[in-house]
Image (cartoon, grey):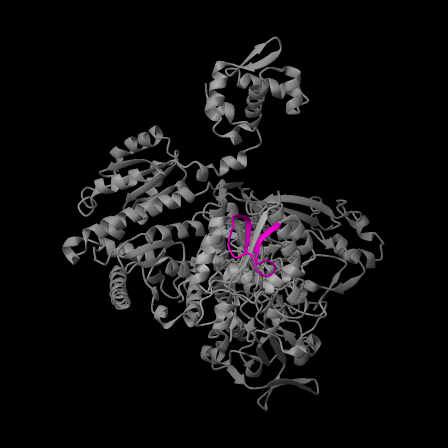
Amino acid sequence: MDIYSILSHPFRRKILLLLEKEGYILYTDLMEKLGLETTGQLNFHLKKISSLIGKNRKSYFLTEDGKRVLKILNINKRILSGENIDEYLDSKGSEISRIGVIICTCNTEISNIINIISIENYLNKLKKVVSVKVFENLCQQKNFNKITQWVKDNFLNKIVIAACSPRTHQHLFERIFDNIIDRANIEIANIREQCCWVHQFETNQIDPSLSLEKAKLLIEAAIERLNLQKKIKVKRVEIEKSCAILGGGIAGITLALNLARSGIKVFLIEKSPTLGGKVARWHRIHNMGDCSICFISELISELVNEKNIKIFTNTEIENVSGEVGNFTLNLNKKPRYIDEKKCTGCKQCIEICSIEKPNQYEFGLTNRKIIYFPFIHSYPYSPLIDEEDLNNCLNCRICERACVNKAIDLTQKVEKLEIKVGSKVIAIGSDFYQDLEDYHYNPQKNIITSAEFERILSYDGITEGKLLKLSDKRLINSISIIQEVGPSEYLTNYSEILAQKYIEDIKIRNPDCEINIFYDLSKLKDKNEILLRSTNPRFLYANKITIETNKDKNYVVADNIEFPSDLIVLNLKFIPNKDLTDFRKYMDFTLDDNGFMSEETLASGIYGVGTIFGPLDYNSTISSTNKCALKIISLLSKDYLIAEFSGIKIDDDKCGLCGLCFKICPYNAITLESEKISIDKFKCKGCGTCASVCPTSAIDLNIDTSEKIFATIEVFSKFKAQPKIIAFCCASCGYAAADDAGLKKISYNPNIFIVRVPCTGRIDTNFIIKSFEIGFDGVMIIGCRQNACRYIDGIEKVGNKIKLLKNILLPKYRDRIVLKHMNAVEGNMFAEISNKFYKKLLEEVKFEA
Amino acid sequence: MKPRVTIISLTSCSGCISTLISLDIFPQFLERTRIIFFQFILDAKNIEDTDIAIVEGCVSEETQITLLRDVRKHAKKVYALGTCASCGGILSLSSSKVADPISNYIETNGIIPGCPPPSKLFGNSLIRLVENKDIILSQKNMCGNCSLKRDMKINSHINIYKIIPNPEEITLDEENSECFLKNGILCLGPITRDGCEYKCIKMGLPCEGCMGPVSKDFTSNLINYLSLINLSQELKEYAGIFYRYSKPKFRR
């Protein structure tokens, strides 16, 4: 009879309770009292508890077994009350804790220094401890079965291991108890590296009784901490193994290929009617030789052959919902008015169409028909009619008749689609700077932008690759290129490369052409950087550049020197994509000072590639794309994500929305959503800086709770010798440095007690004040080296607090707070600082006495 | 059986007692309780057994500690009234005088915070005490319900250089007024317990923190908070803002 499975359901507990109260109950009464309408459920539960109940003339009663079970369980009325006690069961960890202590003697390393029997006796007297067991070598395979047997025999649910540092064997111990005890319920008391090995009598004349007492307190503190540990709810998110890429430019295409080849299903969504993005209209890419449309069309054909990729062109995002692993995208596929499957691309319809308008894919330099191809190598290879053009069209339907395959369907409507993906990537690229009035921009008067110049150089462009003036189609003999046209706040790293490329291309077409490249320093913020980068003698730097026109001839006037130019090219900067602001409605990120996307603020599961973070050249775009592909593959290679293990929890009843936490969070994991604070569980790394500033204690960590830290401090304050020092050490560096002192067996005084915090940013001013109040004479804070904090800037945050605290303390206390930066290998420094601090305090305490 | 009530005063301005006497429900309170020790209205000299003891003012002399212990011995429940009794109060600013909350010496069953306690909270608390219930205090800080909050976010660009606004800048027009932090004025709302009905803020003055902290202690909360914003140098060294209503125990 499995009593636990019987009692696991609230319904069955309720039935038992009712039977105990009433004695005999009829089946119908039972149904009524339980509020049931169908018999099936009741029958099922009655069958489950058949061993505890009997039936007599349609009435149910408790058997002797049942009465005995209830008697035993009666101790806890709450279990029997029959309410849904899931919540109660979750926190049973704190209410019923059966703590066992394992002491490892580490051969003789630990037992040589401290008296194990004395510790055992001390621990056995503690009320919270169920059982104490001493092992010789805990980390050896042969002991594992013995340990698990001991845990089962004593019904332990929490375990303190008094042995070496958690940094040495934590994972091993966690593996031993893998299926028996939750990870959060294993606490390691570091009595080897931070007690026995550093407080040896022989080397430094340290009172052995102090080492013993310290070991006792270290273990007791671990017991206290475990006693306060609540059960942690674990959230599991199944991952959809697919990825949506928004934007079919070069970054999107490369990424889609990378992901598809690693077996991830990819949805490539492009707003315009063709893939290829900006690069498809470039003449060629610097240092690559190949003309860009050639390799883009090659990439696209690879893309089309890939089974895992689904391409949506002419498609816009309507809405995005869900979280990492499970996003839902609602798409609007705009009508093309031409059935891609039927169309053969014969262009009959285009020839016959009679209305023309400027082609935006040639930057307005040439005209196109209403029904058109964006450019010659566009994908999908079928013409289209823009949705808005259909109203301006003559509606002659001549194209419909001209089409041999009957592919044209002018009645197409917007198609609504819904896709589910595990992650999404924003690759929508950037826009070009457009405010060109100062430069007298006019393609017909030979003042053009770099994008248009690419079309002139391009063999399929307006002049078929020849260097001809747009005004009169005469050969160009002098070209001026004005660099960095755009906002002055930032520089583009590709402008030199682009100018270099233009020089090469111009020289091929007309070796006699005069080329001058200008920088207008008055319009650049980082003048020095530009001057430092200067490499080419053709680059001219001027404090003021203007463009003047005189008798159909253009001049660039640089610092009062005139440069006559047949063609003036404005090398445009990228500016943030105008769609970014729209995207913010349904995706979680913020914009940086220049208006580009800020990478750190992207919510988890959302990535960005390409120029959305700022101007990039082709090669950097490709390498950043590959980097991003790795991130996505590693995310989607898992079957599920586990969240909320070491993160934080928020108590909404206490939260007053002051916003201190989202100010301090280094990862922007905390956001304000509809008058409620919410945490991105996958972004949160569990550093706990937010918990340290929360004025109402609404935020706390799941494992390193403030309650546990206070309990630890309180236990340590029982140490009898003076002066007492408390050292808050960050888990990654400070604690490791203390361990390192142990490994090197560098002796320091046992009066120093080490409290492990996840990050020094976790340290609340209250911890320090409380330590002094409770009787500690000195507080040490050991964190990472500056600029090397694992959690970005935790050490600086605690530094700010301490600066303020020292300002208002009496001079006596100012020197009693020590903040030090250390590496994990600087054990000798840790010992040195501790000893120095100890000696200083010892003198002060003596003086006071 | 009417509950027996003892009300004693330690070092204080007696503002809380005046507020108590001027409460709407004070006559009702007198009717429903039996006051056995209240120096303002009774001549009783000795502390006797009592159900509820309400203590006003902070501890600053040895004799007061004896008195407090005596009260604790005779009372079933002891409540701290006002900021002085619950946190230390305005006397914490003094460098020579000791100002301790009563909880440093005896166990308390609850507090009625405020300097003086806001009448609504005070009245409700008294009624609950008479009905033998515990006092309910808000667990949140002020910002949540503050009318000036709107889309205010605390960030490092905030420079604080004043603790009160210039008199000519004070505006009573709630529609037009902005969060004090935006204008460089220190407001202690984020670290102060909600429940005072925003009297100061409605009068165009920033929160001074008289309701005390929700958790932790006043000084550490303030340091945590100020470490996140840019504070002008003279304010950093001005202990007045750090010890306005309470002082850590060890600073003596």
Vertical comparison of A542 with A331: above or below: below
Q: Is residue A210 left or right of residue A2?
A: left
Who's the residue at 57% across and 11% down the image? Answer: A55
Q: Position of residue A479 (x, y in %)?
A: 59, 80
Residue A813 image position (x, y, % from top left): 36, 68
* Direction from residue A224 to residue A111 in the image, left or right: left
Residue at point 49%, 77% (across, down): B234
The residue at the far left in this view is A202
Residue A673: horizontal and vertical position, in percent? 62, 54
Q: Quadrant of the C terminus of chain B?
A: bottom left
Q: How many marks?
A: 0
Residue A755 horizontal/vertical position (percent): 35, 54
Between residue A136 and residue A340, name the one nearer to us.
Answer: A136
Image: magenta residue range:
B34-54
Inspect this view and state whether residue B118 appears: no
Residue B62 visible: yes
Q: Quadrant of the N terminus of chain B?
A: top right
Q: Determine if the magenta segment contains residue B52.
A: yes
Residue at image point 42% right, 63% down:
B62
Let me know if residue B121 is in the magenta part. no
For the view shown, which residue lies furthest in the top direction? A57
| Corner quadrant of residue B9 | bottom right
Q: Is residue A576 above or below residue A90?
A: below
